[in-house]
């Protein structure tokens, strides 16, 4: 009985969840700005959105929001309404903030390789914040979290495999050096997730 009460007391409050969604989305969207301004790519639905953004010149935020819509059905069916609502809010925030950041931040000098690696680190940390509060950024994240929760397959490992394939498929969009550093950045991002988001590590 005492363990049940202790677990209940450890659960996140609504305010904590709201702040986590905002902070995690801010981190991810800022990392996306670094990748976009350096001309790099990444994996998952964000990688797909980058490809379409580079090809069509439609804003990344708009594409990212739209490309995630089909995955909410799986989220509701497999992960529940609470997870889906939080994920929808996180995706909306990242979509909005990734288009808002450039209105306030401009980089006069940005070393592409450094920005790509550092941007992926920031995105990885933002993912951990969102995952810890039972949210994601849609797409591959939903599938990865579902497989981790139900079959023990680490989210980071699955995402790493998918992300590397997506980045390699982007060869026609970026140069070979940027492709190599984009793959390295995707590996670093997913190593961060694999090391910090393991099945059974958290109970609330």
Image (cartoon, rainbow, N blue to C red):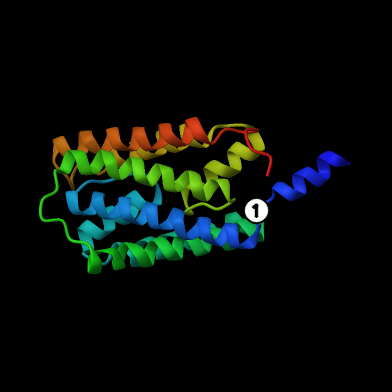
Where is the N terminus found, in terms of image quarters?
A: top right
User: x, y percentage for residue 136?
Assistant: 51, 52
Q: From what the image shows, is residue 5 above or below residue 154? A: below
For residue 164, what is the image quadrant? top left
The reply, left or right, for residue 8 in relation to residue 49 is right
Check the image and name the residue furthest to the right: 1
User: x, y percentage for residue 172?
Assistant: 18, 45
Q: Across the whole image, how many numbered discs are drawn on residues?
A: 1
Task: Please name the residue that numbered disc 1 is placed on.
Answer: 12
User: x, y percentage for residue 61?
Assistant: 34, 64
Tell me the SS state at disc 1: loop
Look at 16% across and 43% down and name the residue there.
112
Which residue is nearer to you in this view: 136 or 167?
Answer: 136
Which residue is nearer to you in this view: 95 or 77?
Answer: 95
For residue 171, what is the image quadrant? top left
Look at 45% across and 53% down and name the residue there.
24
For residue 102, what is the image quadrant? bottom left
Residue 73 in view here: no
Look at 30% across and 37% down and name the residue there.
185
Look at 78% across and 43% down and name the residue there.
6
Where is the C terminus found, in terms of image quarters?
A: top right
């Amino acid at each position: 009985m005492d363990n049940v009460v202790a677990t209940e007391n450890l659960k996140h409050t609504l305010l904590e969840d709201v702040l986590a969604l905002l902070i995690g989305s801010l981190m991810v969207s800022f990392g996306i700005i670094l990748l976009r301004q350096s001309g790099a790519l990444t994996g998952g639905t964000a990688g797909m959105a980058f490809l379409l953004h580079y090809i069509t010149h439609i804003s990344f935020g708009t594409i990212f929001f739209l490309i995630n819509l089909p995955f909410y059905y799986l989220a509701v069916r497999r992960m529940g309404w609470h997870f889906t609502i939080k994920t929808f809010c996180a995706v909306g925030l990242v979509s909005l903030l990734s288009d808002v950041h450039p209105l306030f931040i401009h980089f006069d000098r940005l070393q592409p390789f450094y920005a790509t690696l550092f941007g992926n680190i920031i995105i990885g940390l933002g993912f951990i914040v969102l995952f810890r509060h039972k949210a994601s950024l849609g797409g591959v994240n939903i599938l990865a979290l579902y497989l981790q929760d139900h079959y023990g397959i680490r989210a980071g490992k699955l995402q790493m495999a998918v992300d590397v394939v997506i980045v390699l498929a982007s060869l026609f969009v970026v140069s070979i050096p940027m492709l190599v550093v984009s793959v390295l950045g995707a590996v670093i991002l997913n190593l961060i997730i694999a090391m910090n988001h393991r099945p059974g590590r958290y109970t609330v």
